[in-house]
Amino acid sequence: MAQTTELVKVVVVGGSFAGVATIQTLLASIKSGHKNIQIILIEKRDARHHPIGAFRALVDAEYAKRVWIPYSNLFPKDSHHKIIQDKVTQVHHDHVVLASGQTVAFDYLALCTGSDNPAPAKFLADSSKESIAITNKAREDLKKSKSVVVVGGGACGVELAGEIKNAFPDKKVTLIHSSQTLVDYPGYSPALKAGALTHLRELGVDVVLGVQAQIEGLTFQNSIQVAPRTIVTPGKTIESDIQFLSVGNRVDTSYISTLKPANSSSFDSSTLVHADSHQIKVQKTLQLFGFDNIFAAGDCADYSKVQTAAATGAVAPTIAKNIIALEEAKAKNKTAKLSNPGWYPSLMLLATGPETGVIAMPLIGTRFSNSISKALKSKDLMIGMTNSSMNWK
Ligand SMILES: Cc1cc2nc3c(=O)[nH]c(=O)nc-3n(C[C@H](O)[C@H](O)[C@H](O)COP(=O)(O)OP(=O)(O)OC[C@H]3O[C@@H](n4cnc5c(N)ncnc54)[C@H](O)[C@@H]3O)c2cc1C
């Protein structure tokens, strides 16, 4: 790439798995010569949340602080890269508008705004202090409770029920799931789904399948509820004094509604997202349709079938590679040869405590339990990996 004094501004919105993978790949390219790229990370939170450790944080006070990682070491000291703590509310073809009213111009934009889950998986609050307080309060409420209900048997519900039962073996823990199969995502082995059920029952969790539980007062906003509730199912009556909602992953890409190509007032920006999931539609190059300089990856985009950090980590670096390819082609006055992320792992490991978990190999379907789960995930919930991507010890 020709070295010019003019900075090429790459704005990355969202500093989690997708955003940080994009940034780390860009930083590597900058190190090897692309010095005129300036990265601007716009992140609404004051620290990076590591959701993979969220349920351990619920039961372990020491872990609650560890799942919030400062952004202070992300960029090399004295570099020209910047972090702006604010929320992007509007995206335009060459700039974004923030909640504070500030506008930030870009040459390239990477939308990595992820998804929201009910607390304590993720948090509606943008402050780490406030989010830690929610987790700590829930832990104290859990300690006082006798019987716990978790609604939703996706990966989060399975892990949440498992972590609670593991930390508080004397409490009655019931997981209620609407369908007959736990963790029923496309592309995952039947051995994982069956293994999750066997594993939870071995831990002592009461799993109730095929029941659509509507619990009074339990909502996405109020997803941890301390209240006596009775659920009557065809087979049994379930009493609980604390309930957790673990369904309803949400994607907020409302900022896209302002995006139009330059000189086009008639463009319908609703075509850029899926009406049901609100995920951004991306080409195989991760570019938005009709916007060569705007990319999206991770939970907010439709590239991966299942929203996982593993898939995101494999896919998102392609944003950086394609930005570099576009810049190099521009310098040579040529058409860029862009890449596709290609394969990403459909491997899922469900941790249910520091020593326990279940994993099934894709395709061959072999189910492994505690010892392999512990080595691969359960012990530290991959926090070391996230710390290292943030240059944090
Ligand atoms: C409890 C739990 C456990 C999980 N365990 C695993 C696991 O073991 N393995 C696995 O592979 N996956 C796991 N996942 C899934 C994984 O966490 C997600 O797929 C991953 O977080 C997606 O990363 P992301 O960067 O796309 O988005 P997110 O992690 O959701 O991050 C998005 C970032 O964007 C910021 N943001 C959002 N909107 C704006 C805005 N408008 N302006 C500025 N900033 C914004 C947010 O603050 C956030 O920092 C788990 C998820 C949960 C909830």
Image (cartoon, helix red, strand yellow):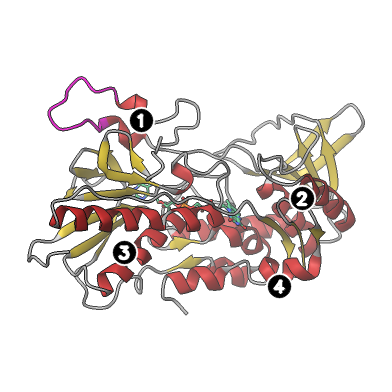
Indicate yes or no whether the magenta region holds residue 263: yes
Residue 93: x %, y % from top left: 20, 38
Residue for point 33% across, 42% down: 287
Q: Amino acid at mark 1?
A: Leu
- The span from disc 4 to disc 2 (Cα, nearest Å) is 18 Å
Which residue, given by chain and number where applicable, does mark 4 sit on? 375
Closer to the N terminus: mark 1 or mark 2?
2
The secondary element bearing badge 2 is classed as helix
Q: Is residue 103 left or right of residue 56?
A: left
Q: Which residue is mark 2?
A: 192
Crowding around mark 4 (Cα neighbors within 10 Å: few <14, some 14 to 19, many 20+) is some
Q: Going from the N terminus, do you reach mark 2 or mark 3 first?
A: 3
Q: Point out the tag, 3 or 4, that comes first from the N-terminus.
A: 3
Residue 384, how many percent across, how many down?
A: 55, 73
At x 76% / y 56%, what residue is drawn? Answer: 162
Mark 4 secondary-structure assignment: helix
Q: Amino acid at mark 4?
A: Ala
For the residues labelled 2 and 3, the Cα–Cα distance comes to 36 Å
Predominant SS along the magenta part = loop
Residue 354 in which image quadrant: bottom right
What stretch of residues is rendered in magenta?
A: 258-268
Residue 44 in view (yes/no)? no
Q: Nearer the viewer, residue 341 or 22?
A: 341
| Residue that label 3 marks | 26
